[in-house]
Amino acid sequence: MSDILIIRSNCDAATYGTYNIGEGLVAYLQGKGHTVTELADAAASPANVQYWLTSAANRTTKLVIALDHGSATGFYGEVNNQITPVVTTANVKDLTQNLHVYTFACSTCSPGGLADTAISQGTLSWLGYVQPVYVFTDPNSALFKTLKDVIWSFITSLADGFTLETAEKALRDAYTAHKNDNPVFSYNLNLLKLCKKTTGMTIHSHNRLGGKSLIGTWGGMVAWGLPNNYVSAGAWTFKNDGTWSYASGGGRWIQIDDTAIWTFNNAPGLVYTCTVAADGLKGVMGYTTAPPNPGKGHFYALRAAAVSEAPVDVNIGPIEESLMGVNGEPLELATGGSVVDEVVRKYLVSLAGSK
């Protein structure tokens, strides 16, 4: 079973370009904690695509990345070094149902074409182009390397757990930033289209597994001791390999059904546990070690929230020593009040002043 399937044939000048767009992508995504299968060159055959995408077997669970030829009615792989349809309007219901699809290929998002058919038959999202688009074919050229970075911008955003809308914006912004480098960038940008079932989806919140997965990036809010007195705890990123991280540390996590629990390498005895929903977490945290310790509290988190990192490590609790600036000044002066709201800031300063 794989989170992501990459399809990239290599049988003519155009696919030589798209093939090289995908060079290094498997390693990058695996480094983000995703499981990845790649059908490259001759392996991008109809039989292999069928094997990895048929919904009955559920071998691919989240995302298809397709770098190849396309048309209004099909996406192509290859057989005997010749371009061959592998996903068409006839089989798209089975092959891409409950998946997200990203095609750097011609015309798959033509009105009434392959992408529209896919969405109407259960595909979650499909990003592609409404007409033929262009690729540079010299992988050593500066323009090719820039286009590769542009194409990857959508993928990297999805891999980090951001919503489709955020990922689309990243791609559009990347194209726009280079529109004066060569007409290809503005031309491709104008033909870009995202088809989707609904808004606010990520590849972790909506997929063939039902979406209740901790994997991805969340914006955490924590309340130690005082009920409903929440403060931003920054971004939490959970990877497939059972590790998680945030600005000041990280640890290990496990999930069974919709219940998750994680620990901290940098805070012995601290445990967070929660119920995992498609787009949110809600739970409690506390220390299993004997007092004195920061105690316990409540937290919640939303997927891929645009959050600022907290000026102190609020994930591990309101420890007095962490409430002072580098010169011993109260937190209110150290932070300039940029993140913590007024009520919480006064509470923290009162703690700092109690030493």
Image: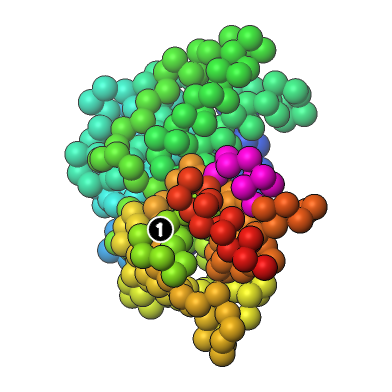
Amino acid tagged 1: Asn
Query: Which residue corresponds to mark 1?
Result: 229
Magenta stretch bounds: 331-339
* Element marked by disc 1: loop
- Most extreme residue toward the left is 120
Camera-side residue of 354 and 92: 354
- Most extreme residue toward the front is 354
Quadrant of the drawing holding the C terminus: bottom right
Quadrant of the drawing holding the N terminus: bottom left
Q: Any magenta on residue 341?
A: no
Answer yes or no: is residue 179 visible. yes
List x then y, in percent, for residue 55: 29, 59
Q: Residue at x 67, y 72 (%)?
A: 266
Q: How many marks?
A: 1
List x then y, in percent, for residue 68: 50, 35
Other residues around mark 1 within 10 Å, as few (<14) / some (14–19) / many (≥20): some
Answer yes or no: is residue 118 visible. no
Q: Quadrant of residue 348?
A: bottom right
Residue 19 located left or right of residue 261: right
List x then y, in percent, for residue 207: 34, 55
Q: How is the image coloured?
A: rainbow
List x then y, in percent, for residue 124: 30, 45
Camera-side residue of 114 and 46: 114
Camera-side residue of 313 and 291: 291
